[in-house]
Amino acid sequence: MTDSLLVDGLLPRHRPRKFTNKVIVRILHFFGYHFLLKRGGTRLARVAGFELTIRPTVYDPRYYRAPEFFAQFIDGLDLAGRAVADVGTGSGLQALAAARAGAASVVAIDINPNAAAAAVANARANGFAHRISAVVSNLMSAIARETRFDVILSNPPFCDGPAWDTADRAWNAGEKYKDIAPLFEQARERLAPGGVMYLILSSHSDLELVGSIVRRAGFSAGIASQRRVLLETMIIYELRPATAAA
């Protein structure tokens, strides 16, 4: 993690100007939705060393920077014997990376039934069926409150705006991020003592707003890793309950 926790929002070193940011996001969303998220048929992909089957409406990690970067980061964690949740699993890539990093059990969670089914199929195809299970759930609402995880991972939708349909939930997080805001309180309730959450966002996200949501849920945040890619920066945040981080 970087030298200190961030007190003025979750801000990376490089951020696009707001006008430029909005234009870029709208262009990327148009093409991403119509040509990737709504693309029919099942595809095969190889990402971060895993063989993946990508079902219709499921986020395809080949065409976005965050999933492989996050998977590489997870590879560097010591998850031996840990219980892990992957919220917004999509194809299951982050869940697979957690299992490869030694996690004893991984629950892959997604609101999209096609994504949960893809995560199960991809776990089986890559030899991790015994450690990865999947749950169809709106964030962690279907996970029993008494369940505890040592590590929670999330690659949520990055953008502020209403989702057009289930497929678009991979891109848009609702007005003022209302669709993902409950995640952080849910995650804090389900973290084991000493547990940690890793969250990946883009500099195209409204980081100040997400930061305020994170803090209200009782987390302290620091940047664990970041990578500049073309016109954006991918940022992985380490979130810990504020009392534990103090």
Image (cartoon, rainbow, N blue to C red):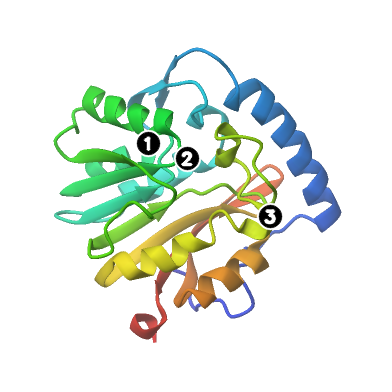
- Residue 56 in percent (x, y) is at 49, 21
Residue nearer the viewer, 104 or 162? 162
- Residue 70 in percent (x, y) is at 44, 46
Helix, strand or loop status at disc 3: helix
Give the CA separation, mark 3 to mark 1. Answer: 27 Å
Residue at mark 3: 175
Query: Is mark 2 in CB contact (under 8 Å) with mark 3?
Result: no
- Residue 24 in percent (x, y) is at 77, 42
Give the CA separation, mark 2 to mark 3. Answer: 23 Å
Amino acid bearing label 2: Pro
Give the CA separation, mark 2 to mark 1. Answer: 7 Å
- Indicate left or right for 24 with 146 as reference: right
The answer to whether residue 81 shows anywhere in this view is yes
Helix, strand or loop status at disc 1: helix
Mark closer to the observer (2, 3) = 3
- Image quarter in which the C terminus is found: bottom left
Which of the marked residues, 2 or 3, is nearer the chain's N terminus?
2
Residue at mark 2: 67
170 shown above or below 50: below
The residue under the point 41% across, 81% down is: 242
Crowd rating for badge 3 (residues with CA inside 10 Å; few <14, some 14–19, many 20+): few
- Circle on res. 93: 1
Which of the marked residues, 2 or 1, is nearer the chain's N terminus?
2
Amino acid bearing label 3: Glu
Query: Is mark 2 in CB contact (under 8 Å) with mark 1?
Result: yes
Tell which residue pokes out farthest to the right in this image: 19
Residue nearer the viewer, 62 or 111? 111
The answer to whether residue 91 shows anywhere in this view is no
Which of the marked residues, 3 or 1, is nearer the chain's N terminus?
1
Amino acid bearing label 1: Leu
